[in-house]
């Protein structure tokens, strides 16, 4: 949680994260300044590796200025989602419903953000589905039903919109040729 004390006629504020004094990345925008605190989830940049950096939380008020930077804080890591899947029919017939059971594991150091997944057949989006937030070391299972058309190369990708900064995006995808 980031806390502040409202002074004067400040109406809204943005909360940002700065790395080694660089231009801040906004984490939350348009927060009612009267609230006095808000929860944000800062994430390390994908290119940080294991190098120590000075991250600071900054607040930009409705007057347009960044104020009250924090001291250096430590960010512990990123999530790393990995997808695998199985499907319901050994020899599916064209036009039949195929149920895919998608297992999503978080192999990273921190909890993932909720995100979206996508099922594509031959590169064309057929279904989208919600992926819940997943704790570090935990997994979640999502069911996706799709009406089979053949021949098809099915690709399931979790976090297709990039809601999480991950060290390995390649393991977010599962692919299988059916028919």
Image (spheres, rainbow, N blue to C red):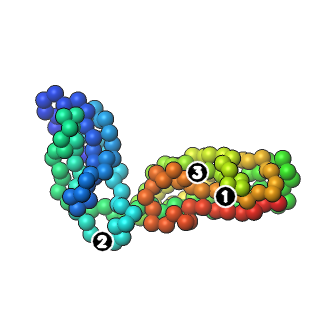
**Helix, strand or loop at disc 1?**
strand
Q: Are marks 2 and 1 in contact (CB under 8 Å)?
A: no
Residue 171 lies in what quarter of the image? bottom right
Q: Could you tell me how far apart the alpha carbons at marks 3 and 1 are, in whole angstroms?
A: 10 Å
Tag 1: Cα neighbours inside 10 Å, few (<14), some, or many (≥20)?
some
Q: Name the residue carrying label 3.
A: 117
| Earlier residue among tags 2 and 1 | 2
Q: Name the residue carrying label 2.
A: 51
**Helix, strand or loop at disc 3?**
strand
State the residue at coordinates (49%, 48%): 114
Q: Position of residue 13 (x, y in %)?
A: 25, 37
State the residue at coordinates (61%, 58%): 103
Farthest residue, direction bottom: 50
Q: Nearer the viewer, mark 3 or mark 1?
A: 1
Q: Report the front residue among 140 and 62.
A: 62
Q: Could you tell me how far apart the alpha carbons at marks 2 and 1 are, in whole angstroms?
A: 34 Å
Q: Position of residue 122 (x, y in %)?
A: 72, 55
Q: Position of residue 165 (x, y in %)?
A: 43, 58
* Residue 131 shows in the view: no
């Amino acid at each position: 949680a980031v806390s502040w004390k409202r002074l004067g006629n400040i109406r809204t504020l943005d909360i940002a994260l700065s790395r080694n004094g660089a231009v801040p990345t906004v984490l939350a925008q348009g927060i009612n300044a009267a609230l006095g605190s808000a929860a944000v989830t800062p994430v390390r940049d994908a290119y940080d590796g294991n190098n120590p950096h000075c991250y600071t939380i900054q607040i930009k008020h409705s007057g347009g200025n960044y104020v009250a930077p924090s001291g250096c804080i430590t960010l512990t890591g990123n999530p790393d989602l990995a997808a695998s899947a199985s499907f319901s029919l050994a020899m599916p017939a064209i036009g039949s419903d195929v149920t895919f059971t998608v297992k999503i594991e978080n192999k990273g150091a921190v909890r993932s953000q909720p995100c979206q997944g996508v099922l594509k057949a031959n590169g064309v989006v057929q279904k989208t589905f919600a992926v819940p937030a997943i704790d570090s070391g935990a997994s979640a299972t999502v069911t996706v039903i799709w009406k089979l058309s053949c021949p098809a190369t099915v690709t399931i990708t979790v976090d297709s919109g990039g809601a999480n900064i991950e060290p390995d995006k390649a393991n977010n995808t599962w692919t299988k040729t059916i028919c």
